[in-house]
Image: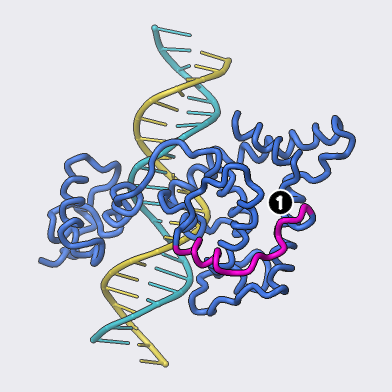
Chain colours: A blue, B cyan, C yellow
Amino acid sequence: MDWPPWCDKIVKKGPWTPEEDIVLASYIQEHGPRNWRSVPANTGLLRCSKSCRLRWTNYRRPGIKRGNFTHQEEKLIIHLQALLGNRWATIASHLPQRTDNDIKNHWNTHLKKKLSNLHNYGYHQAIVAKGQWEKTLQRDVHLAKRAFSEALSLGLKPSSSAQCSCTKPPFSPSYALSTENISRLLQGWMKNDSSKSVAINQDEKKSADSLPQLPLQSPETWLLDEIAEEAMNDILRN
DNA sequence: AAAATTAGCAACCGCAGTCAA
DNA sequence: TTTGACTGCGGTTGCTAATTT
């Protein structure tokens, strides 16, 4: 049965009910998450294919982690956002248990605010610590970007342009933003991070592990000096 | 206690990319 | 080469719960 042309008139919107979820989940379990157009047609759900896909991708897909973001996850999101901009899908690929929608919502409702506080707190610290705080988060982000560019000139592997879905790179060259290269940069950052407990994609990690270390760990070229890091931790904890 | 405001989040919308016919 | 179907993405909206006045 094809989805009728008048489907827009009967399509249901708004929150999904548990019953609809069960129907969707059992259908996907049987047929796999593809051919979304067939889902409403074959299940009788009064939802458009898009809505079914979104519901599955963001809420019903196995392995999705819901609930509070850990401190470590937040830091990773902040760093990736600084590097990539609002490319939520790319950022989400580095937090496999989180969806892009979840990350985007968390950024818009929590992290932006926290970063704003961090910025203000930074200027306060600058006065208190007699200039030690001149490395505010914004500057750190700038440094990260510079380090990124420098690292590229030191031989980060270009990705095949066809695989790079980045349409709006924050800085050039555009090939910089491949998954592999981002993983390398993250690895550099994580080496400086105390907990090192972020679950990055295991394949990416293997790939990154097999590559020579890049000179990204020096204070001059990587993100946060101890003071900035501590202040950031304070803000994120609150 | 009630009304107003704010915050958080699920879901929708529109656009762009991909691919097959 | 063109066209249409499908999919993915990011921005935005709107509902609900929590908080403030």
Which residue is depicted at the point 83% across and 43% down? A134
**Helix, strand or loop under label 1:** loop
Which residue is depicted at the point 57% across and 42% down? A195
Image coordinates of residue B2 in percent, x first then y, are 41, 12
Which residue is depicted at the point 30% across and 43% down? A14
On-image quarter of the C terminus of chain A: top right
Instruction: Name the residue furthest left.
Output: A1
* Residue A211 covered by magenta stretch: yes
Image coordinates of residue A167 in percent, x first then y, are 55, 70
Report the front residue among A48 and A180. A180
In the displayed structure image, the side of residue C9 where residue A157 appears, left or right:
right
Q: Quadrant of residue A120?
A: top right
On-image quarter of the N terminus of chain A: bottom left
Which residues lie in the magenta part? A203-219
In the displayed structure image, the side of residue C15 where residue A10 appears, left or right:
left
What amino acid is labelled 1 in the image?
Answer: Leu
Q: Chain of mark 1?
A: A
C20 to A105, vertically: above or below: above
A148 to A133, vertically: above or below: below
Report the front residue among C8 and A237. A237
Image coordinates of residue A216 in percent, x first then y, are 71, 60
Residue pointed to by mark 1: A223
Which residue is depicted at the point 28% across and 48% down? A60
In the displayed structure image, the side of residue A103 where residue A182 appears, left or right:
right
* Residue A191 covered by magenta stretch: no
Report the label total: 1
Image coordinates of residue A55 in percent, x first then y, are 30, 50
